[in-house]
């Protein structure tokens, strides 16, 4: 896996950006770039399981399973991947999802003079780097647009 890093400046208070990024209603509004049916199930509370889900072109549910390892409100969120959802089935552990298990997705939020900088870091298999390099900046631009 390789850790990728993306950042964006958003002209909005950190609390608005944090709440918009993680909100049940607003999360799909910026992550639709990854998948038009993108959503999450679970909680952003530390220690809780969270599922990042969507439906593929064949109508099958898929996505990532994780644990919220850290959540410092308006500052930092880190998810550790524990498995995948493939064709609606939850597959956990390194044997079930060797390309993703143990990876992280983290968001750092910092505000200066009403501008919030969001830094996203994500561990991905080498094979999907081009996809993430194209898609993640677009998703963060969507987040910026809905926070304005």
Image (cartoon, rainbow, N blue to C red):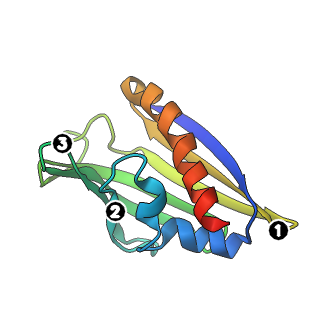
Nearer to us: label 3 or label 2: 3
- The spot of residue 23 in percent (x, y) is 47, 73
Q: Can you tell which mark lies on residue 29?
A: none
Q: Quadrant of residue 18?
A: bottom right
Q: Is residue 47 visible in this depiction of the protein? A: yes
The residue that appears at 82% across and 68% down in the rendered structure is 114
**What secondary structure is found at the residue carrying circle 3?**
loop
Residue under label 3, please give it: 57
Nearer to us: label 1 or label 3: 3
The residue that appears at 54% across and 65% down in the rendered structure is 21
Reading the chain from its start, which is encountered first: label 1 or label 3?
Answer: 3
Q: CA distance from mark 3 to mark 2?
A: 16 Å
Reading the chain from its start, which is encountered first: label 1 or label 2?
Answer: 2
**What secondary structure is found at the residue carrying circle 2?**
strand
The residue that appears at 36% across and 51% down in the rendered structure is 81
Where is the C terminus found, in terms of image quarters? bottom right
In screen coordinates, is 84 left or right of 142? left
Q: Answer above or below: position of 139 versus 20.
A: above
Residue under label 1, please give it: 114
Dot 2, crowdedness within 10 Å: few (<14), some or many (≥20)?
Answer: many
């Amino acid at each position: 896996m390789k850790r990728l890093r993306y950042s964006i400046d958003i002209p909005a208070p950190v609390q608005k950006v944090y709440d918009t990024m993680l909100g049940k209603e607003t999360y799909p509004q910026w992550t639709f770039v990854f998948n038009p049916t993108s959503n999450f199930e679970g909680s952003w509370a530390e220690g809780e399981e969270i599922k990042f889900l969507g439906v593929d072109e064949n109508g099958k549910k898929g996505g990532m399973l994780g644990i919220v390892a850290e959540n410092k409100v308006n500052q930092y969120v880190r998810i550790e991947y524990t498995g995948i959802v493939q064709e609606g089935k939850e597959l956990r552990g390194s044997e079930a999802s060797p390309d993703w298990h143990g990876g992280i997705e983290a968001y750092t939020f910092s505000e200066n003079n009403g501008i919030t900088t969001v830094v996203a870091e994500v561990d991905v298999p080498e094979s999907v780097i081009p996809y993430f390099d194209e898609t993640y900046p677009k998703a963060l631009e969507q987040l910026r647009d809905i926070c304005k």
